[in-house]
Amino acid sequence: MSKKKIPSITAADLTSKRGFALPIGCTVLSEGINFSIFSRHAAAVTLVVDLPATAETPRQQAHIPLHPEINRTGDLWHILLTTERNDLSYGYRIKGPFSPEKNGLVYNEEILLLDPVSHVLVPRAWGEQPSTPDIPKSKVIKHDFDWQGDRPLNIPLARSIIYELHVRGFTHHPSSNTTHPGTYQAIIEKIPYLKGLGITAVELMPVTEFDENDNVFRDPGSGNLLKNFWGYNPVSFFALKSGYAADPARHINEFKAMVLALHQAGIEVILDMVFNHTGEGGYGGTTSSFRGIDNSIYYLLDHTSKEYLNFSGCGNTMNCNHPIVRELILDALRFWVIEMHVDGFRFDLASILGRDTSGHLLANPPMIEMIAEDPVLRDTKIIAEAWDAAGLYQVGTFSTDARWAEWNGRFRDDVRTFMAGHKDTVASLATRIAGSSDLYQSSSRHPFNSINFITSHDGFTLYDLVSFNEKHNEVNGEENRDGDNHNFSWNSGTEGRTSDKAINRLRFRRMRSMFLILLFSQGVPMINAGDEFGHSKNGNNNSWCQDNETNWLNWDLALQNKGFLHFCKQCIHLRKTHSVFQRTSFFKTTNGDNGDKPCADNHEGMPEITWQSLIPCQQDWSSECHTLAFLLNGHGTDSDHFFIMLNGDSRNDATFTLPLIPGSSGQNWAQIIDTSRASPHDFLRRSQAIARAPGTTIKVKPMGAVVLQASAIPL
């Protein structure tokens, strides 16, 4: 069937009607295209439409003033263009007061503004400079994609294993062996790897449009401007990043094809959303949309000086609890779920969602409640980064609603300090392993409200965590002033790369031990992409501006460190096949309390988890202790029993005495994991494992971990 021919028109041919106030944005209707934009304080609004060249007509622009009495309903300015063409680009010029010191309004009709709810901006390849300021960047779009009956996977959060990745960094390195490196298409090509790894969800770093060229810092070596690689500087909450597509002109369908393919492989898609600020920055930044539309409503301003309140650390802060902004955020989230089929969201600096229009923390923030209660979003995963750049830290207190999960920064820090040999860490580590009941139980939440992680995009990689004492961010162009100074890392004996075999063995032992703790703790594990095969950023803990091998995953390491990768896969598989690691409720005994029957005595009533130091029944929560072991009782589940021993001492072996096996008479433990051993002996199938009798002893190497398994025979 041939496509319907779209007639050529000129700017003079455009006709219009009053149009409709809702829906806001640009909507293709049978009778034409409806445009609607919010601006409360505007005195005049002009719609600027760009008509691309055709065989019959050159490219033209139409400037269409909106009549304040005809084309306005309340604060919404709207118009309907009666045209069959939907290949138009558009923008707005808005006139109004310019008095930043008086009321925070900074209208400038010379600036051509983006539609803040546009689903598409003019596509461009990665690194390409944006179009000139007088060319509209918002585009008309009519979505057209065959989803083949795709439906949400709705994998329970307790059974989820999240894999955080950067679309470009994941496959841009030549070693990725993908057809279109650094793109949504390349992620499709890597699905067999992701499926083989065993993760259940990918969490994509920001994929809404941003300007990667907005960085002012230079590489100190070459003098070249650095990129804004991570993308935490949005110019839109709706428009997809076209620069991540193999074909930028077809980026939306390429993204949808990626989501569909991931769903067909049983993998969910979670987006990292940045609602706390925009790329417009402070008053000296680039006005692209919100500031020129209604600055005093979209941003938090000091009531007296009208300066931007900067809780984001990026020059401005969105006014998230203004009703207009709340609706904008909800509309964006609904769009990504309904039209793009994503499965959840991670909210960057989410504590800002809880601040009122003066920046004060609200007791019951409506924005946070509305996201949790929205009927469209009801089955999506919602994850808070429960802090902001102004020092507000809400891990455990972000929300009492069980819908909200949180990045558990306490888990990260407590695992790191234990595995770096710090004192006074055992009790805290036990609490994290047990699901962080101190943070989530009192508000009737669950272990799966804790998103456990040791590393993420922000900070050291797992390899760097065991290889560097200090950050090494000189290449970021800020003289190493940027990035966190509190990494809780230990270089294992020398700073950076080394050929010392003993140090390298220790480093991989520590990496295996930390990965083991991550996967076998209660809560939802999140893995930083590349950690599973030892990717290094050479000690850079703030690589936001590095569009190079610092952030491009080197897939050669997957072969070079194939033993470690195999270990990580096996840990993931073991977690997924035993529900004792995926609890939906907290242990009935309190942390550090083994209950009325503290020892495995083959009788009913044994605790679900039993803690010890070196000797069964004997715990040591002192500041000098560096050893911790725990027995997970598999009775009443579809799981086996597990006994896990951890040695956080950096120098000395630890000798553990094995407890009795719950409900067993004559059964031995099977030693399936020893992180001090080289692959493939670090993780054995149970049928291959050494039998260990209860009451005997096992030595665990410094910074090592040993795991024993036994059948949960019914009592």
Image (tube, helix red, strand yellow):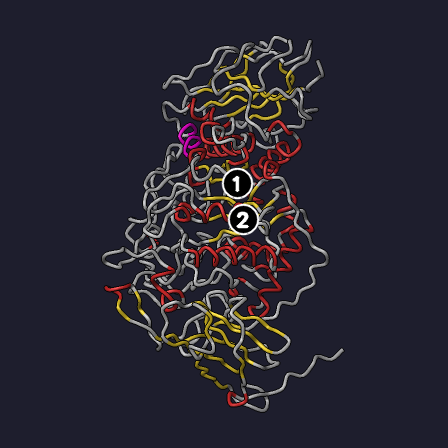
In percent of width and height, residue 49 lies at 49, 80
Q: Residue at x 59, y 60 (%)?
A: 255
Q: Residue at x 47, y 28 (%)?
A: 442
Q: Indicate left or right for 540 with 382 as reference.
A: left
Which tag, 2 or 1, sits closer to the chain's start? 2
Label placed on residue 203: 2
In percent of width and height, residue 263 lies at 66, 51
In percent of width and height, residue 605 lies at 61, 12
Magenta span dominant secondary structure = helix
Of the residues shown, which amino acid type is indicated by label 2? Glu
Residue beneath disc 1: 526
User: Mark 2 and mark 1: span between their CA atoms?
Assistant: 9 Å
Quarter holding residue 417: top left
Q: Is residue 185 visible?
A: no
Q: Residue at x 61, y 60 (%)?
A: 339
The number of callouts visible is 2
Q: Are marks 2 and 1 in contact (CB under 8 Å)?
A: yes
Span of residues in magenta: 413-419
Q: Is residue 418 magenta?
A: yes
Mark 2 lies on a secondary structure that is strand
Q: Indicate left or right for 593 with 176 as reference.
A: left
Q: Quadrant of the N terminus?
A: bottom right
| Label 2 CA crowd tier, 10 Å (few <14, some 14–19, many 20+) | many
Above/below status of 343 relative to 30 = above
Label placed on residue 134: none
Q: Indicate left or right for 40 with 520 as reference.
A: left
Above/below status of 466 relative to 354 = above
In percent of width and height, residue 350 lies at 43, 47
Residue farthest toward the right in the current orientation of the protein: 1
